[in-house]
């Protein structure tokens, strides 16, 4: 009788453990005073996400037993300067919201995880975006962001893709990591643009000790011309500083081709960090080949693990007909533009 009771207790405990789950509320509120100057018009504004993207999210995981788990991630972009939500799209072709209400535009996925890795379904970051943000000292946020993202010809899936099926390698491969993603435009089979928004992307990398390097490739289909993109990024931690760089190429079939690169670094200074970068992007067209070059310098001061003050200065120079401007300013072709960010970031 005692053995039966013990067996029942063990079974009950096992069932409870298999059903264990947790849900976490998280987010970032980042307020930025941003100023931009150009040869045509200047702009002064209170905006957001100058250091980290403002967001509100929910994530959770359930232990299914036997090394399996299920998880979800719902993350919404927040414009805390005016209270609106972020822009999103439903088919990888064009934005279908204007940021009026809260949408889980940043990520909305459900996953199955195990020794085989992770299968992830929903709206998520594209593999080709990771190299741009991971190997950018400014994390593709604020006025210092890499010119590749500002000027990219990569189309609607440069950062995220909707209707995606993703796979991630397990994390126990001796430093090697990788992912594959297929995403769908979900058009009718008899439509002229039936393949628009369909795409495939891959990323493979190696991170061990001070070294982190990764290569990514993607192709997104459009009637107007498929977009092929690839990039290579890397980082080396010297202890006293982290040096990082990336190179990118975007090729629109029957259209233009863009190439860009960045080199920069992160330097710890007391309770803060100095960020600096030089980035450029050139669009190969018939004759002109417009190019924009940017230098950026910033400093982040951590008041605590969750709260930081930051400032960034950037200047972009335009050549061969380019007219890139910063922080909402307007500048004429071949003229310069400068921008400043001052802000505070709080995470929870």
Image (cartoon, rainbow, N blue to C red):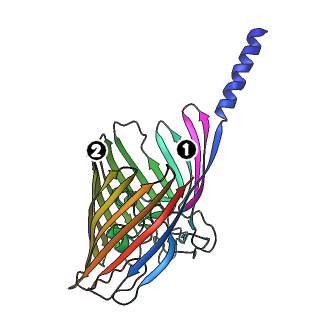
Nearest the eye: 146 or 233: 146
- Nearer the camera: disc 2 or disc 1: 2
* Local SS, label 2: loop
Dominant secondary structure of the magenta stretch? strand
Q: Earlier in the sequence, mark 2 or mark 1?
A: 1
* Residue 327 in the image, given as x and y percentages of width and height: 42, 77
Tell me where the magenta segment starts and ends, as one range. 55-74
Q: Is residue 255 above or below residue 197?
A: below
* Residue 46 in the image, given as x and y percentages of width and height: 51, 74
Which part of the image, by quadrant, shows the N terminus? Answer: top right
Q: Is residue 64 magenta?
A: yes
Instruction: Please indicate, yes or no, whether residue 123 appears anywhere in the rendered image.
Output: no
* Local SS, label 1: strand
Give how far apart the Cα atoms at labels 2 and 1 are. 36 Å
* Residue 14 in the image, given as x and y percentages of width and height: 66, 26
Per the image, the residue denoted by label 1 is 112
Q: Residue at x 41, y 85 (%)?
A: 42
Per the image, the residue denoted by label 2 is 239
* Crowd class of label 2 (few under 14; some 14 to 19; many from 20; radius 10 Å): few
């Amino acid at each position: 009788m005692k053995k039966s009771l013990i067996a029942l207790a063990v079974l009950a405990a096992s069932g409870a453990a298999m059903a264990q789950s947790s849900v976490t509320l998280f987010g970032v509120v980042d307020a930025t005073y941003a100023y931009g100057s150009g040869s045509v018009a200047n702009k002064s504004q209170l905006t957001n996400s100058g250091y980290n993207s403002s967001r509100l999210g929910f994530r959770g995981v359930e232990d299914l037993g036997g090394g399996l788990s299920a998880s979800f991630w719902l993350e919404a972009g927040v414009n805390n300067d005016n209270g609106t939500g972020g822009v999103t799209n439903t088919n990888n072709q064009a934005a279908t919201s204007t940021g009026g209400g809260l949408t889980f535009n940043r990520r909305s996925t459900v996953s199955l995880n195990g020794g085989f890795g992770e299968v992830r379904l929903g709206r998520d970051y594209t593999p080709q975006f990771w190299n741009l943000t991971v190997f950018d000292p400014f994390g593709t946020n604020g006025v210092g962001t890499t010119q590749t993202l500002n000027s990219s010809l990569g189309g609607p899936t440069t950062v995220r893709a909707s209707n995606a099926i993703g796979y991630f390698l397990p994390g126990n491969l001796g430093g090697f990591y990788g992912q594959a993603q297929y995403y769908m435009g979900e058009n009718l089979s008899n439509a002229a643009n039936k393949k628009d928004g369909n795409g495939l992307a891959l990323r493979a990398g190696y991170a061990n000790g001070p070294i982190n390097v990764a290569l990514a490739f993607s192709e997104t289909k459009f009637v107007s011309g498929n977009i092929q993109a690839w990039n290579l990024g890397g980082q080396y931690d010297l202890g006293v500083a982290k040096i990082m760089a990336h190179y990118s190429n975007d090729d629109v079939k029957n259209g233009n081709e863009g190439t860009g690169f960045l080199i920069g670094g992160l330097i710890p200074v007391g309770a803060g960090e100095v960020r600096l970068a030089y980035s450029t992007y050139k669009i190969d067209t018939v004759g002109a080949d417009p190019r924009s070059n940017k230098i950026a310098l910033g400093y982040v001061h951590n008041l605590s693990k969750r709260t930081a003050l930051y400032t960034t200065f950037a200047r972009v120079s335009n050549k061969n007909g380019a007219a890139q401007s910063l922080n909402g300013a307007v500048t004429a072709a071949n003229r310069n533009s400068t921008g400043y960010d001052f802000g505070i970031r709080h995470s929870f």
